[in-house]
Image (cartoon, rainbow, N blue to C red):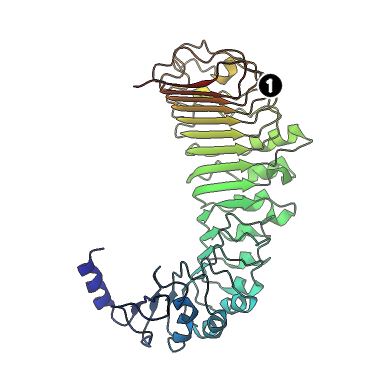
Amino acid sequence: MHDIISDLAEYASGEFCFKLGINESGSVLEGEHSCSFPERTRYLSIPLAAAYGGGLRIFRSIHGVQHLRTLFPLYTLRKVDIEALNDILPNLKRLQMLSLFYLQDVSSQLLNSIGNLKHLRHLDLSSTAIERLPENVCTLYYLQSLLLNGCRHLMELPSNISNLVNLQHLNIEATNLKEMPPKMGKLTKLRILESYIVGKESGSSMKELGKLSHIRKTLSIRNLRDVANAQDALDADLKGKKKIEELGLMWDGNTDDTRHEREVLERLEPSENVKQLFILGYGGTTFPGWLGNSSFLNMVQLTLSGCKNCILLPPLGQLQSLEELYIKGFDDVVAVGPEFYGSDPSMENPFKSLKILKFKGMKKWQEWKTDVAGAFPHLAELFIAGCPELTSAVPRHLPCLLRLSIEECPQLEEGIWMRES
């Protein structure tokens, strides 16, 4: 914001909001407050400049600020005086927001102290080296946001995390969690849950996901191979979750029961409001009828990857709003024929909105039926790579094509063709 407005905001906030700047030697930057924090300080901001050298001393200056509400953000304070932080944290009884983002030396003593901050609403431990969360974190009944993104050493969540009944945002992206803890369905206020990891135990099954009716925006469901009963997939009620816009369905690519995997995917039909769909590692031989249904009027991007057992592509030409299509790792597809374009008589121009089409890693693909009238009227970019058996030519009538890329397809003419619009 403009300097004048910034100065006015600082003046109006008085002693309640405190902004600190420290140079590498630990001294306060020119124009900033001193390190003697007023007792009435409620919000302590440590800008990006207050890093490294200053971070080693800063926490020893907070002892007298027992009414602090916010200690956020810390940004690049990777090297801090953990001992001092361990000392002061238990005294900050009224703390509501705490960010330890990117701190690499978070201790078990510190984590145990966090469990005593009963008024905490927001806790950010993203990109720290924590291996586990203490069970007493599950007593933070007012907690609304728990961010664990990038905690790569984190293998499991506390078994009683379902006690956090006010939790609205749980971020576990880029962790090494193996499954969700039991009774996740009790977290009925959850709005943002980027990942759900299916477990073999009944308490972390797909049924629990079905109870989280307010999930919105982005959701990826991992370990779908562990869905024991296809009915559990139906109970997840993806079709009823109208506010999910980006959905990922992920298997591990290995299965001995292709029929079961098809039954699971058939029952994972999403809401028609989904805009981006990713299906990865699916082990069935065919796709269910809902994929490619023209009722998905909002779908603009679709990725199908690692579906090694599939022998046919779904009728994607009927997706009227689809703009980007990525198909990768279909080892058993030999021919792409009329089924790819769909049989809906009302669809005069299959793939009417498609702009980007990419095929990659289709080991047995030999033939592509391209003489379908009116197909791909707006296709601008076409990529074909890693299809060594493909012999038939690409579509001839592509009026909007700007880029054609063919790589690792020895039986096709290789190279990149560009035409100015």
**Residue located at (52% from left, 51% from top):** 215
Tally of numbered discs: 1
Q: Is residue 287 above or below residue 91?
A: above
**Residue located at (73% from left, 54% from top):** 202
Q: Residues within 10 Å of mark 1 (few under 14, many from 20)?
A: some
Can you tell which quarter of the image residue 19 is in?
Answer: bottom left
Give residue 123's position: percent from left, percent from top: 51, 69
Residue 189 visible in this rendered orientation of the protein: no
Q: Is residue 232 above or below residue 38?
A: above
Residue 161 visible in this rendered orientation of the protein: yes
Give residue 203's position: percent from left, percent from top: 70, 57
**Residue tagged by mark 1?**
364
Q: Is residue 351 above or below residue 34?
A: above
Q: Is residue 99 above or below residue 228?
A: below
Q: Quadrant of the C terminus?
A: top left
**Residue located at (37% from left, 82% from top):** 41
